[in-house]
Amino acid sequence: MIQFRALSVMMSTFLAAAAAQAGDWPSWGGADRGRNMVSGEKGLAETFKPGEKSTTGEGILPGTTENVRWSAKLGNLICGNPTVADGRVFIGTDDATLQNDPRLKRSKGGMVWCLDEKTGQTLWKLAVPVRPKDRLPVNAHYGQQNLGVCSAPAVSGNRAYVLTSSCEILCLDVKGQADGNDGDFKDEGQYIAGSGKPPVALEKTDGDIIWKFDLIEQLGICPHDVAANSVLIDGDILYVTSANGVNHEHTFCLRPDAPSFIALDARTGRLLATDTEDLGHTMWHCLWSPPTIGVVNGKKLVFFGGADGVCYAFEALASVPEKPVHFAKVWSYDCNPPNFRDPLGDGKPFNYYLGDKRKKYSTNKNDGTFLGPSEIIGSPTFHEGRVYCTIGQDPMHGRGRGLLHCIDASKTGDITKTGCVWTYGGIERSIASVAIKDGLLYTADLAGKVHCLDEKTGKPVWIHETGNETWSTPLVADEKVYVCTKSKLVTLAEGRTRKVLSEISLGSSAYSTPVAANGTLFVCSQSYIWAVQKGAKPALATAAVALPARQ
């Protein structure tokens, strides 16, 4: 067992080191499928000037920025995280820009953008239509499609995979329609137009769908609020949580027997595997946690954060099965201790909605002290044989007590007790993952506190108060820690001494996690994306997003 443990740690260390090398950032977590938010980039700027916004709303005024190669205005809401691969930047937004598209003129659904990495010019974009009520389960509470595409696209070769605001997994051609309408899917014109509308005439700057997997129609799930999850790529296999959720009152799941965790064939979109954990009967809210992968005791495992507050480990598929199979569970770990699940101590089912700050009857004072159950929203992070997991709730529900777990991934069965390496209770509810480098762990909670802990013991090294609600996971790169809050980008020095390097107002809320690729830091606010490059000249810093010439 010791030899297997040593081998597992060695393999994990090698893979993490390889992933941390400078280069592209092709998925949520970069090239590290353990979702450890660490980049090997060097020479990144620790500060920049975002520039002045044009009065016409078309973008940033040229010559008003510093350390910015280009910027672009992308709709009215960016909740997704950018990914960078093969000279392209991919990101999900809302579809507010369609107000200026003579073919459509609508604004409520989503958009997948593809920008040129060097210039910020739009290469293509795919409009994701609003899913109408008649294509949703009866009584579905799915009213946040205006948030747009909230998932970070995952890129492998000439394909990009994304979970849309319409609750579908799409496989997209990274070149869009510029190289023709590839794949078996030929209905992009109808897809872009939306149900019940005449199809639009395709242009070379539209996206190209290779295949589509509809989670509602093909899997039988019922989403809640919004679908937000980033696909995990493992060769020809895709792993993703199903976006199944509860009803409006948060009292039961409308489709309790639908799968919670699935695998698809990356080439065709065919369903390969489902879980049998029965989460539809135990979940509190919705499945939003992006899955993770790692090698433990010589076996490849996938880790999945449940809407029931439990972290699960399954055996990864060794190959593409001919027919759908069930995942083999290796272990489960309950991230909610008994006093979180039963805060009143009366043994009765706890009213999940009791802690919603918006309800008149709620006892949550929104000061971080409320005690109640939480689910897993951030990715479980795998690093050197351990899994690190935060718990939290939808930020709209309000602040509350959280918990960060360090789990020994080598155990089997119910490892809630046997797999607990340490827990950290100094954190509030969080939707962030963690970043681990040189023995230190960095994470953030919804209240806006950035926590630096000793990775081995879970003891706090320092805590920084940003003073603003934070959805972002910290990015560690170039001896810096970058984290976005609802008002600014905060840059801290990496290491055991807390030091603020800069605080930059982005002009609006920021919900996205910064990423680093090819010597550039990509930062998003609610409406803008900046390619931040040290030494970039103001004259070249910004470029209005101009579509390539229609052909």
Image (cartoon, rainbow, N blue to C red):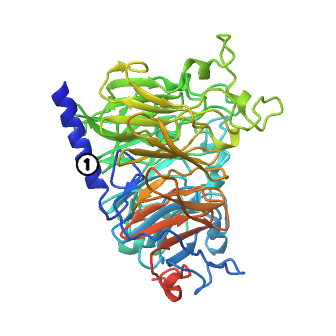
Residue 233 visible in this rendered orientation of the protein: yes
Residue depicted at x 65% and y 55%: 146
Which of 233 and 410 lies nearest the eye of the viewer?
A: 410
The amino acid on which the numbered mark 1 sits, given as a three-letter code, is: Leu
* Quadrant housing the C terminus: bottom left
For the residue pair 70 and 78, the one nearer the viewer reads as: 70
Residue at image x 31%, y 26%? 328
- Return the residue found at the far left: 3
Q: Quadrant of residue 320?
A: top left
For label 1, the residue is 15
- The residue drawn where x is 31% and y is 23% is 411
Determine whether 31 is above or below 292 in the image. Answer: below
Q: Is residue 361 left or right of residue 383?
A: right
Residue 6 drawn at (x, y percent): 20, 34
Residue name at image x 72 percent, y 81 percent: 55
Count of numbered circles in the view: 1
Q: Foreground residue, 471 or 289? A: 471
- For mark 1, give the secondary structure: helix
Image height of 352 relative to 177, above or below: above
Q: Residue 226: image x %, image y %?
A: 60, 45
Residue 231 pos. (x, y %): 41, 48
Classed neighbour count for the residue bearing mark 1: other residues with Cα under 10 Å, few (<14), some (14–19), many (≥20): some
Q: Is residue 416 left or right of residue 286?
A: left
- Residue with the most extreme bottom position: 539
Residue 235 in view of the camera? no
Q: Position of residue 512 (x, y in %)?
A: 55, 57
